Image (spheres, rainbow, N blue to C red):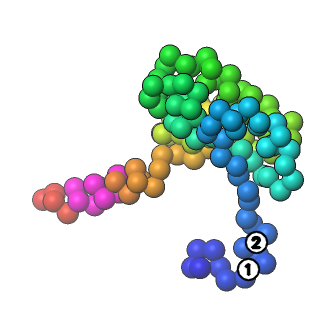
Amino acid sequence: LIRVGTDLAQINARLRCYIMIETRSAVDNVEEIAATPGVDGLYIGPSDLRIALGGATSVDPSIDEVFNDALARIQRAAQAAGIRACIHTASGEEARRRLAQGFDMVTVASDLVHLDVAARAHLDAARSQ
């Protein structure tokens, strides 16, 4: 409650509903998902989506065309519904590239990555002389 406050009406007014798009079924139904009342945005989990679309790994380049077509379809569905197209990214550089591609929102790395980087920096500082 320290970060969000205690006024429930105010908290509820700031809440948003983002639907994860990371399966073939979600892509196949993305226009209907985007048009659902109360949905504020579509959020792409690119690693899971790439695997769901046939990638052998979360970075398999052999399905780049299929993957990029899915991203474009998701963006079009969000735009048509007047909601945000959002995607997770692994780095600041990738985030900048996705924003340039027209995504409305990006997330950068994961909590575990951020914690690891911060913990290593603190340990390095503690060990330095």
Query: From the viewer's perspective, is 103 left or right of 62?
Result: right
Rendered view: 69 above or below 104:
above
Q: Secondary structure at mark 1?
A: helix
Residue 129 image point, x, y percent = 12, 59
For the point 80% across and 43% down, the residue is 34
Distance from disc 2 to disc 1, alpha carbons, whole Å, reads: 6 Å
Q: Tell which of 58 and 121 is nearer to you.
A: 58
Badge 2 element:
helix
Q: Are marks 2 and 1 in contact (CB under 8 Å)?
A: yes
Our reading of the magenta stretch's main secondary structure is helix
> Which percent across, then down, holds residue 113?
40, 50
User: Residue 66 appears at what percent x and percent y?
Assistant: 62, 20
Extreme residue in the front direction: 25
On the image, which quarter does residue 102 sit in? top right
Task: Name which residue type carries label 1.
Answer: Leu
User: Residue 12: which numbered mark, if any?
Assistant: 2
- Occupied quadrant, residue 42: top right
Q: Please state the extent of the stretch shown in magenta in the rendering.
A: 117-124
Amino acid type for the residue under numbered disc 2:
Asn
Q: Nearer the viewer, residue 106 or 66?
A: 66
When the figure is inspected, residue 49 is found, relative to residue 105, above or below; the finding is above
The residue that mark 1 highlights is: 8
Q: Residue furthest bottom?
A: 6
Q: Residue at x 49, y 19 (%)?
A: 61
Using the rendered image of the protein, determine whether residue 20 is visible from the camera's viewpoint: yes
- Reply yes or no: does residue 13 show up in magenta: no
| Residue lying at 45% horizontally and 25% vertically, measured from the top left | 56
The residue located at (79%, 52%) in the rendering is 39
Q: Eyeballing the image, is 106 above or below 11? A: above
Can residue 79 be seen here? The reply is no
Looking at the rendered structure, which numbered label has been put on residue 73? none
Specify the quadrant that holds the N terminus: bottom right
